[in-house]
Image: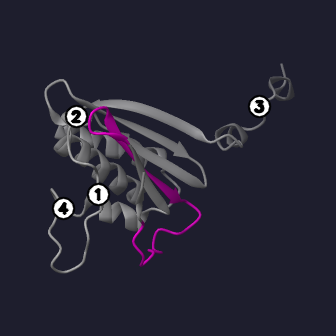
Amino acid sequence: MNNEAWGLGSPGEWLWGSAPMRWRRVYPGRADQVGVARVFAATLFEGTGREEDVAVVVAELATNAVRHSRSGKERGWFGLEVTLADIAYIAVTDLGGGCVPTIRSEMPGCEPRVGGYGLLTVSKLALKMGMHGSAANGFTVWADMDLRRPAHHRPERQVTLAS
């Protein structure tokens, strides 16, 4: 049987076809699983030049899920969803029970929210980001990343967290 009969063409055409590639994974809500999710996402983006940026976004979002929601409790979990396209989509879903995810201000004199600057870091790496859900049912915090932009280009503006 020849290759034309298969209808797929080359491996590159199949791998980098017009449809975006999507993955979903669920991880136990433990701190050690943040690194596992980070490595998984970085591996998916290998060769894009944005592997480390993606890894940082996943680590920050997953850390927040484990630290600030029921995901970090016994039998908790968090979900990772990734879409690889020119505008990549990265989302982490938690089990809720914590505060509404908020970007911490860099303004002097502002009282910090719980934790550090994780969402602020994500906002600087993302084209845009947002959140949906509730404390009762869980939040999904997502970031769109422009893979067409080189990793060394960082916008100076802060992205607003949209819901």
Per the image, is 139 magenta?
yes
Q: Dot 1, how many residues are within 10 Å of its Cα: few (below 14), some (14-19), or many (20+)?
A: some
Label 1 SS: loop
* 54 relative to 135 in the view: left or right: right
Quarter of image, res 12: top right
Q: Secondary structure at mark 2?
A: helix
Q: Is residue 74 visible?
A: yes
The 10 Å Cα crowd at callout 2, few under 14, some 14 to 19, many 20 or more, is many
- Tell me: 100 left or right of 148: left
Q: What residue appears at the point 50 percent right and 63 percent down from the top-left corner? A: 127
Residue depicted at 85% across the width and 23% down the height: 5
Q: Which disc number belongs to residue 8?
A: 3
For residue 49, above or below residue 26: below
The quadrant holding residue 13 is top right
Which mark is in front, 2 or 3? 2
On the image, numbered disc 1 is attached to which residue?
A: 102
Compare marks 2 and 1 and give the one earlier in the sequence.
2
Disc 4 designates what residue?
116
The stretch in magenta equals 133-159
* CA separation in Å, label 4 and label 2: 19 Å
Check residue 129 in the rendering and tell me which mark sits there, or answer none.
none
- Can you identify the residue that label 2 sits on? 71
Question: At label 4, which amino acid type do we have?
Answer: Gly
Q: Name the N-terminal-most of marks 2 and 3.
A: 3
Q: Nearer the viewer, residue 35 or 163?
A: 163
